[in-house]
Image: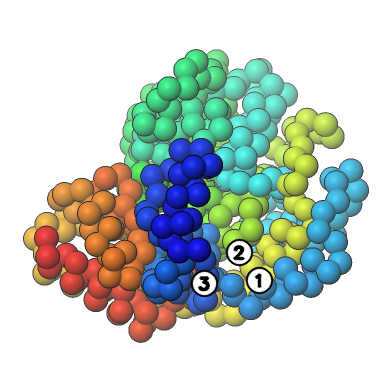
């Protein structure tokens, strides 16, 4: 089957929820992918920050092979060794004491909202409201799209659930003013707004939110679905800011390409979940957790994070050169290998043209080109990709 055949099949049978490019990616190796017509692309998007360890990284492939020979799935009615081990590793390397596993970022945030509500009911006189930021993105379930600070994500889904309100990002005073002493239970925020345009939280903002939550007895919930698992040079984004949250959510890169989500919490907060209060059939199954273990071990022991730090700097230097050359480049933002190049014009056409030249990236918030390559990317690949981008920008 060629690209066109796959596209035809998709158009005929798959729900029309995505605006797709006219290519079908069928194979991946390292930082490269190939489409059904045999064309090769350099992947600067990595499944939107999922393939932190390349495509088909040997550690991930090995974990899938080994675990799939033993046991793919059992119910959470039983103990699951890879799940317990992955939870232990996540807790060892973070602020958290307990982990709830699910299958996606939205579900991880849904779990965080549910836990915050139970905690509010148990300890804070029934407080339930979550404050989140304008331009944030937290998922597509009804609760998480209501927490998401983007009108376009919420459009058409009224009536939305109660108990969510948005505040301006990076504005501490507004956060404090927005707190409702009777209702607000917590503040949900990303350390870098990935979908919202690669907007990095000011260190003073996150530290201020931590202090505010402590002073007002609220939960600080960090959505690290996109920033987690090494992408910002630290294993978790919050480590760049010298704070710890009460609850954190992960997904994307944690599964090395398999679907997984995780909600991590401090013991006192996690204790508001009791047997029966939340569950997931597939959450934390043996296969995904074995792969999650391989991902975290490889990230921590294989020099990947060091590579992310070095390549992040190298990538940034390359983007600086583009900014100096093209007057329509407004700015560069990001940390590690989650980077954005803000343009004066819409970026969709540039993404299209880059794809035609063999480079995958995407555009968020209309004007921001987003780069989230595998953390294992090399200097040579970055140079090649930025060369393609430069050629495309020069045509504008
Ligand atoms: C910060 C953040 N939170 C949550 C989500 C939702 O994750 P998922 O698509 O796995 O439900 C995303 C997805 O892009 C995200 O970037």
**Of the two numbered discs 3 and 2 in the rendering, the one whose residue sits closer to the viewer:** 3
Marks 2 and 1 in Cβ contact (< 8 Å) = yes
- At 34% from the left and 41% from the top, the residue drawn is 170
**Residue occupied by mark 2:** 256
Callout 2: 10 Å neighbours few (<14), some, many (20+)?
Answer: many
Judging from the image, what secondary structure is the residue with disc 2 in?
A: loop
Q: Quadrant of residue 334?
A: bottom left
| Label 3 or label 2, whichever comes before in sequence order | 3
Q: Any mark on residue 317, and which?
A: none
Per the model, the C-alpha gap separating discs 3 and 2 is 13 Å
- Considering depth in this image, is 82 or 192 the residue closer to the camera? 82
Per the model, the C-alpha gap separating discs 1 and 3 is 13 Å
Q: Quadrant of residue 247?
A: top right
**Residue occupied by mark 1:** 60
- Considering depth in this image, is 370 or 121 the residue closer to the camera? 370
Callout 3: 10 Å neighbours few (<14), some, many (20+)?
Answer: some
Q: Is residue 83 left or right of residue 325?
A: right
Q: Quadrant of residue 113?
A: top right
Q: Is residue 286 left or right of residue 196?
A: right
Judging from the image, what secondary structure is the residue with disc 1 in?
A: helix
| Label 2 or label 1, whichever comes before in sequence order | 1
Q: Is mark 1 within 8 Å of ligand 1?
A: no
Which x, y percent locates residue 171?
33, 36
Q: How is the image coloured?
A: rainbow
Which x, y percent locates residue 196?
36, 44
Q: Is mark 3 within 8 Å of ligand 1?
A: no
- At 37% from the left and 79% from the top, the residue drawn is 381
**Residue occupied by mark 3:** 28
- At 66% from the left and 17% from the top, the residue drawn is 125
**Which residue is at the far bottom?**
380
Callout 1: 10 Å neighbours few (<14), some, many (20+)?
Answer: many
Marks 1 and 3 in Cβ contact (< 8 Å) = no
């Amino acid at each position: 089957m060629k690209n066109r055949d796959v596209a035809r099949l998709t158009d005929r049978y798959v729900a029309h929820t995505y605006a797709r490019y006219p290519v079908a990616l069928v194979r991946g190796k390292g930082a490269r992918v190939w489409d059904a017509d045999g064309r090769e692309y350099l992947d600067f998007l990595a499944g939107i920050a999922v393939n932190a360890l390349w495509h088909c990284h040997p550690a991930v492939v090995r974990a899938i092979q080994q675990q799939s020979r033993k046991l793919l799935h059992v119910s959470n009615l039983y103990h699951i060794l890879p799940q317990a081990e992955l939870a232990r590793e996540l807790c060892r390397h973070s602020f958290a004491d307990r982990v709830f596993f699910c299958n996606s970022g939205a579900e991880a945030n849904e779990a965080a909202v549910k836990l915050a509500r139970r905690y509010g009911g148990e300890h804070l006189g029934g407080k339930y409201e979550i404050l989140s930021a304008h331009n944030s993105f937290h998922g597509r379930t009804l609760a998480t799209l209501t927490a998401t600070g983007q009108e376009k994500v919420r459009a058409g889904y009224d009536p939305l659930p109660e108990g969510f309100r948005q505040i301006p990002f990076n504005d501490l005073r507004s956060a404090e003013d927005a707190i409702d002493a009777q209702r607000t239970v917590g503040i949900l925020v990303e350390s870098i707004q990935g979908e919202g345009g690669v907007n990095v939280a000011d260190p003073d903002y996150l530290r201020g939110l931590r202090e505010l939550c402590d002073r007002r007895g609220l939960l600080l919930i960090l959505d690290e679905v996109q920033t987690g698992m090494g992408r910002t040079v630290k294993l978790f984004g919050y480590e760049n800011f010298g704070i710890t949250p009460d609850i954190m959510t992960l997904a994307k890169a944690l599964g090395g390409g398999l679907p997984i989500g995780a909600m991590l919490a401090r013991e006192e907060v996690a204790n508001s979940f009791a047997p029966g209060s939340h569950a997931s059939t597939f959450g934390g199954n043996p296969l995904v957790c074995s792969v999650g273990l391989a991902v975290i071990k490889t990230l921590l022991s294989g020099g990947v994070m060091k590579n992310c730090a070095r390549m992040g700097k190298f990538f940034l230097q390359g983007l600086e050169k583009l900014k100096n050359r093209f007057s329509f480049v407004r700015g560069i933002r990001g940390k590690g290998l989650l980077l954005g190049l803000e343009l004066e014009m819409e970026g969709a056409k540039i993404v299209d043209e880059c794809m035609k030249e063999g480079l995958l990236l995407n555009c968020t918030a209309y004007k921001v080109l987003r780069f989230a390559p595998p953390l294992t990317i090399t200097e040579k690949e970055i140079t090649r990709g930025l060369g393609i981008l430069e050629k495309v920008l020069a045509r504008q």
